[in-house]
Every structure is written in structure tokens, then in C-alpha cells.
Amino acid sequence: MTLIMGILNVTPDSFSDGGSYDTVEKAVARAKEMIAEGADVIDIGGESTRPGSEAVSVEEELTRVLPVVKRLKVEVKVPLSIDTMKPAVARECLKLGVSYLNDVTGLRDAEMLKVAAEFNCKVIIMHMQGMPKVMQENPHYEDVVQEIKEYLLRQAEKAKKAGVKEIILDPGIGFGKSVEDNLRIIKNLKEFTELGYPVLIGLSRKSFLGKITGLEVNERVEATIAADTIAVLNGAAIIRVHDVKEAKRALLVVEAIKQI
């Protein structure tokens, strides 16, 4: 059964829901709502990684995420994930019992690799060309699928050597990719699943869907479901979404068809 990872951005500037859950109470309430709707994991992020976003300090990111993590560890049963590029933030959250480390920089930082191994958590290794501030400025690949596969496999091998036992790969839809690149990755997702690791895909409300449909960010639910459906049929083990209720309903049908 494909897992649903619910997105909980405790940021003022995330591309879709920035500022919506900017207090601990709002964030905890939204997490509980997503769990009731069918989320298997809650992914908490305290720094926007939208194209053009500015980095925040470790202190600011910790101020945003730690109170939410502390509350949720006591009040909910599902595993929690921390979406961060900073080893110091990862460490503090993993100390509190967070189960997943979601690193959009794909363990490029040697210190992050050490943290991941030390806490023996599930690690999501994502591919990103460049960094969020500049990643969408003319991204280019000779062979997008092959290049990302090679990168993810190389980072996974590093993680294994460092002692990380549970590795999940994410090709990084929208992170330094053109519309065509994103579509090619989704269409050929089986090539990533054949690497031998679970694959996470994050398509929710992404800008490439807006470019295809002409719709604004909060109008892309149906487009997200269409793309997620194809990704699941092509082997995605986890889908990362904002709209959990709708994703869960669609996933029940997809899984029923897959099992026939």
C-alpha cells in the first residue's frame, strides 16, 4: 500500500500554504486533520524551498518546528518527518523521536550524513539541481532520468556506507527541472524504483501542473491527483501531498485496481 505523507509547512512563505499554519495551535490542528483524512506520515518543514526562496537561520527554523514536533510527539501516533537542509535542525528533531529525515539537498552535507547515521532514522534522499534560490534558472540535463538515477544511487551508497539502514529516494520534482523534465521523470518512474529503494514523489500543487493547466496554486488538486495516480501505478511507495483527503480517496481506487 502506498503511503501518504501529509505536508505541514510552518513557514510564512511556502509556495502553496505559507502562513496558513504559523502558530503551534494551527499547525497541530492541521496535522490532526490530515491524520483523520488518511495521512500515514506528517512532514514538518520550517523553511521554504520554493523557487527563489531565501534561507533562514538555524535558530529561526528551530523556533518554528520544535514546538510543533514536541506537541505532535505527545498527541498523535503516526510517524513524523522533518523536512530540513540543516544538520542542527535535523539533530534536535530526531532527538525528540522524529522518524524520517527529509533532506532536499540529498545528504550533500557530510554533517547531515553523520546525523542520519547516528539516529538510525529513515532518510529521504532528494535530487535538486542547484539550491532553491536559483534552481529554476535554466535547469539543464543531457538525460534527466539517467543523471538523477546516477546521483541518487551514488548518495544512497554513501548513506549505506555511513550506516544508514532505511533509505528512500526522491527524484525531486520541480527542484531544478523544466516542465518536460518533470513529466519525463513521472513517466519513467519505474527506472527509479528498479534501483532497489522505495521512491517518494512530491507533485502536490507544483508549478509544472499550473503551467499545463493554467490554474493557480490552490486550484491544482485534480491535476495533482492525476499525476500522483500515474506515479503510484509506476511504483511510487510514498506520495507527499497537501490535500490528503482527496489523495486518499483516489489512492483507494488506484490500489484496488493494482490488486486485481
Image (tube, grey):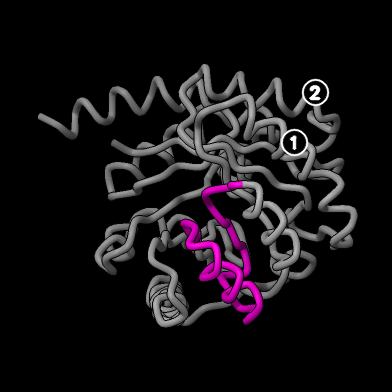
Q: In this view, does 27 lie above or below 44?
A: above
Residue visible at 89% across and 53% down? 60
Q: Nearer the viewer, residue 238 or 129?
A: 238
Q: From what the image shows, is residue 89 above or below residue 108?
A: above
Residue that label 2 marks: 25
Q: Residue at x 67, y 59 (%)?
A: 90
Q: Quadrant of residue 149?
A: bottom left
**Is label 2 in a helix, a strand or a loop?**
helix
Q: Which residue is drawn at 81% across and 42% down?
A: 11
Depth order, front residue of 42/117: 117
Q: Which residue is drawn at 71% across and 47% down?
A: 45
Q: Is 83 part of what is drawn in magenta?
A: no
Other residues around mark 2 within 10 Å, as few (<14) / some (14–19) / many (≥20): few
Image quadrant containing the C terminus: top left
Residue carrying label 1: 68
Magenta segment, which residues? 97-123
Assign a secondary structure to mark 1: helix
- Residue 116 lies left or right of residue 58; in this view the side is left
**Image position of 205 (left or right of 68):** left
